């Protein structure tokens, strides 16, 4: 697809969600934007591969047209994007396909439901299916999602306590709940009926049904005014105004970077170790939010490569890794080496039709990092995390190789 093919009438300087469509009008990619016009135009630059990734470059080449839906706010664009990705599962929305490290919104099925942020990998561990009343997500950018929830909370106050409301033990826990009520984080009125209404409105909001909420609130406001409950009617009126004029300045961030939330990124590092081709081994290490996940490290004894051929050994390691779909896929793969290792990894990913960006850490003669090769946006955003997972892979590979040689 070329820049001149963009349907200008559909791309306003307004927040919303855009869709890159294939030749059969299938959705290839979904994204959100502060400005639909500027965001979509940013895909048609000569250095798209460096600014984004090879995957995004390929997506633009495959696309035939762009469609868009305008929203009233960036907050609503964020919610709509998440719902549409979950429904359509577009081919090139790689990051959102595997959501175990991303944030989800869970509303519990309790007398006073709690609205909680839960990591994907913790969902089944923390809650049984019957304990969840409503579930939304995944939200790839943890930072933006938490900002979004702060905005929602200014309109609809909800509980997010560790334990169900009413089961607090000790004065400190009860005091914290009372304090949060006083400062407006928790509902001030202890009415089960009113709170259930609030929960329903939060659910509708995250379903993208803001207009339905406003219609219901307008009806409620008129009923209260007719009953001469003017103070209560005014509170509802203020809520309607807040919904119609959502203040989401905090969400208007840099709308160019795709891989920007280092706190939730899952990165896998790979390295190969041997002594002149003997006792060749490979390893996989994992980092999430700059934290090594050592329980997910893996060792591989190389079986198909004889002699000093690091790229071939890396191909074997990645093929064996991809034979385990039950292992969560990462957002980024880091290989120890230069273009040869990076190309070898990308070859395996293409072979298995897996879309994950790859970066390589090039070392000097003392095996210290000299430079990182790969998409510029990913390197800039995840520089420290890339070096961490690479250092862990080198350490782990050397340790495994020594154990195979039975050296101290």
Image (cartoon, rainbow, N blue to C red):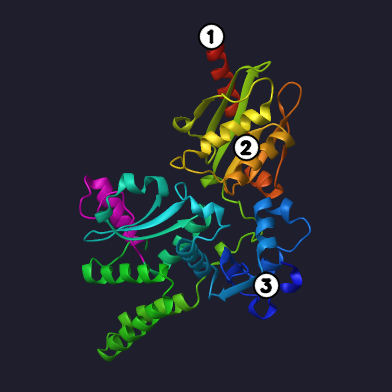
Can you tell which of label 2 and label 3 is closer to the viewer?
Answer: 2
Q: Which SS class for mark 3?
A: helix
Image marks 1 and 2: residues in contact by CB distance under 8 Å: no
Crowd rating for badge 3 (residues with CA inside 10 Å; few <14, some 14–19, many 20+): many
Residue at mark 2: 334
Q: Residue at x 70, y 39 (%)?
A: 343
Give the number of the disc on residue 406: 1
Residue at mark 3: 37
Question: Is 367 drawn above or below residue 290 in the view shown?
Answer: above
**Picture quadrant of residue 265:** top right
Q: Residue at x 56, y 8 (%)?
A: 407
Nearest the viewer among 296 and 104 is 296
Can you tell which of label 1 and label 2 is closer to the viewer?
Answer: 1
Quarter holding the C terminus?
top right
Magenta span contains residue 158:
yes
Residue at far bottom of view = 226
Query: In the displayed structure, does residue 308 sit left or right of residue 396?
Result: right
Residue 148's x, y, as percent?
48, 62
Residue 351's x, y, as percent?
61, 44
Lower sequence index among marks 2 and 3: 3
Give the magenta-colored segment's residue range: 157-183
Residue at far right of view = 46
Distance Cα–Cα, label 1 vs label 3: 61 Å
Magenta span contains residue 205:
no
Residue 277's x, y, as percent?
66, 18
Query: In the displayed structure, does residue 148 sit left or right of residue 193?
Result: right
Q: Which SS class for mark 1?
A: loop
Crowd rating for badge 1 (residues with CA inside 10 Å; few <14, some 14–19, many 20+): few
Distance Cα–Cα, label 2 vs label 3: 34 Å
Image marks 2 and 3: residues in contact by CB distance under 8 Å: no
Q: Which SS class for mark 2?
A: strand
């Amino acid at each position: 697809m070329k820049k001149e093919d963009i349907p200008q009438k559909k791309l306003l300087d307004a927040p919303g969600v855009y869709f890159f469509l294939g030749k059969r009008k299938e959705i290839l990619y979904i994204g959100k934007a502060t400005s639909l016009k500027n965001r979509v135009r940013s895909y048609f630059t000569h250095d798209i591969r460096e600014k984004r990734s090879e995957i995004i470059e390929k997506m633009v080449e495959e696309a035939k047209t762009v469609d868009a839906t305008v929203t009233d706010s960036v907050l609503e664009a964020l919610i709509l994007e998440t719902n549409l990705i979950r429904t359509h599962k577009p081919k090139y929305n790689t990051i959102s396909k595997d959501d175990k490290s991303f944030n989800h919104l869970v509303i519990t099925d309790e007398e006073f439901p709690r609205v909680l942020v839960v990591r994907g990998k913790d969902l089944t561990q923390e809650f049984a299916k019957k304990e969840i009343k409503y579930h939304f997500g995944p939200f790839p950018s943890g930072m933006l999602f938490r900002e979004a929830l702060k905005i929602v909370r200014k309109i609809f106050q909800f509980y997010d306590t560790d334990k169900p409301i009413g089961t607090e033990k000790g004065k400190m826990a009860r005091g914290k709940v009372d304090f949060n009520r006083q400062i407006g984080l928790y509902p001030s009125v202890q009415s089960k009926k009113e709170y259930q209404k609030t929960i329903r409105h939060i659910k509708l909001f995250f379903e993208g049904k803001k207009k339905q909420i406003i219609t219901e609130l307008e009806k409620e406001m008129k009923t209260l005014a007719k009953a001469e409950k003017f103070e209560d009617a005014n509170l509802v009126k203020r809520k309607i105004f807040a919904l119609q004029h959502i203040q989401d300045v905090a969400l208007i961030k840099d709308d160019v970077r795709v891989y920007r939330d280092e706190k939730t990124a899952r990165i896998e590092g790979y390295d190969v170790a041997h002594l002149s081709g003997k006792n060749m081994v490979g390893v996989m290490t994992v980092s999430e939010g700059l934290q090594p996940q050592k329980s997910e490290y893996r060792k591989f004894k190389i079986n198909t490569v004889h002699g000093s051929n690091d790229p071939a050994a890396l191909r074997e390691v990645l093929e064996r890794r991809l034979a385990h779909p039950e292992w969560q896929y990462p957002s980024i793969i880091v290989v120890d080496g230069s273009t040869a290792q990076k190309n070898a990894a990308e070859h395996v990913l293409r072979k298995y039709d897996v879309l994950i960006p790859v970066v390589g850490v090039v070392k000097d003669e003392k095996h210290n990092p000299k430079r990182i090769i790969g998409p510029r946006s990913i390197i800039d955003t995840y520089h420290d995390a890339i070096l961490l997972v690479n250092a862990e892979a080198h350490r782990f590979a050397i340790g495994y190789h020594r154990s195979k040689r039975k050296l101290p």
